[in-house]
Image (cartoon, helix red, strand yellow):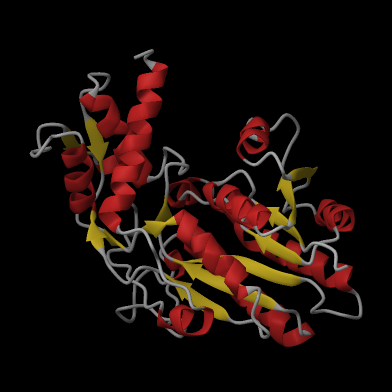
Amino acid sequence: MTSAPRALITGITGQDGLYLAELLLTKGYDVFGLIRGQNNPKYELVQSTVPGVQLLTGDLTDLSSLMRALDASQPTEVYNLGAISFVAYSWENAHVTTEVTAKGVLNILEATRLHCGSTPAAVRFYQASSSEMFGKVQQVPQREQTLLWPRSPYGVAKVFGHYMTINYRESYGMHASSGILFNHESPRRGPEFVTRKVSQAVARISLGLQDRLAMGNLEARRDWGFAGDYVEAMWRMLQQAAADDYVVSTGQTHTIRELLDVAFARVGIDDWSGYVDQDQQFVRPAEVDLLIGDASKAAEVLGWKPTVGFTELVNMMVDSDLQAQQNLAGR
């Protein structure tokens, strides 16, 4: 009788970590999640959302804690989703972003390599790369071979982690893959991210709990997909005989204006101009204007394709926030 596969997930408290844990549990995995710090405020969130996950204490900036987590979990797969992931924050805290989002990848790669010993491909490794690496885009749409030109400290840190993953694959023979994921959202997205900021504000405005919504650049275009779809692609990468890198995207792009159109329409507001203010504090120092991915390689090799469209995704998020705000208001 073969034992169940075992997965260690860093960044378990984020939307991707929660969706991935749910997916792996349904597939019969023993799932371990790395959680940082004492009395982490998201500890109870993970326990209530994915009660089957065993939580371990560790930190991507601390190699010894990663070694202990690997020893305790004995994983067959490692998913490195942990990062300082809010792009705007990275300008304010470039050093911390670099320590976690860049050097943290090196730490978990090295810990995994040391854990594997003489069989470097014994544990399959996934690195969460990002479309923000493309930044000042050199090709439309963006593919696995497109030149990387990051436009934020976050993007720069992700480029370091991406190339370090490739280097460990090529240098040591590790089964290490990178998913170059374009923007992916869900009701579990943090409220600091623009999609959730919009869905939450629209819900509150429709309930009379908020009057205005302050936004930055309304013309920026993004390729938005559903996080629940994208974690399926992560898992499929690690089921391949050979490790590789894959763009994961919908291949469709929408502006912030279109996001506002769909979100406000969901609550019956056709003209949102009277509710939205443009505020310079929300405009990035160096903007990424157009991100749109070509996921044909993921479709061909992994058999992956998105199942949730843009309008359905935005409606899902607005509906969730409406319910949450009604519960908070006691309605």
Q: Is residue 127 left or right of residue 256?
A: right
Determine the image quadrant of residue 143: bottom left
Q: Is residue 16 visible?
A: yes
| Residue for point 37% across, 78% down | 294
Nearest the viewer among 274 and 326 is: 326
Q: In the image, is 186 to the left or to the right of 31? A: left
- The quadrant in which the N terminus is found is bottom right
Q: Which one is in front, 307 or 35?
A: 307
Q: In x, y percent, where is residue 17?
A: 60, 51
| Residue pictured at 34% horizontal, 80% vertical | 138
Q: Residue furthest front?
A: 1
Q: Is residue 208 above or below residue 265?
A: above
Q: Quadrant of the C terminus?
A: top left
The count of marks equals 0
Q: Is residue 289 left or right of residue 273?
A: right
The residue depicted at 91 percent of the width and 80 percent of the height is 118
Give x and y (percent) for residue 127.
62, 67
- Can the viewer see residue 218? no
Above or below, 158 relative to 38 = below
Residue at (60, 82) in percent of width and height: 244
Q: Position of residue 193 (x, y in %)?
A: 40, 45
Find residue 111 and report its horizontal and vertical position in percent.
82, 64
Residue 248 position by quadrant: bottom left
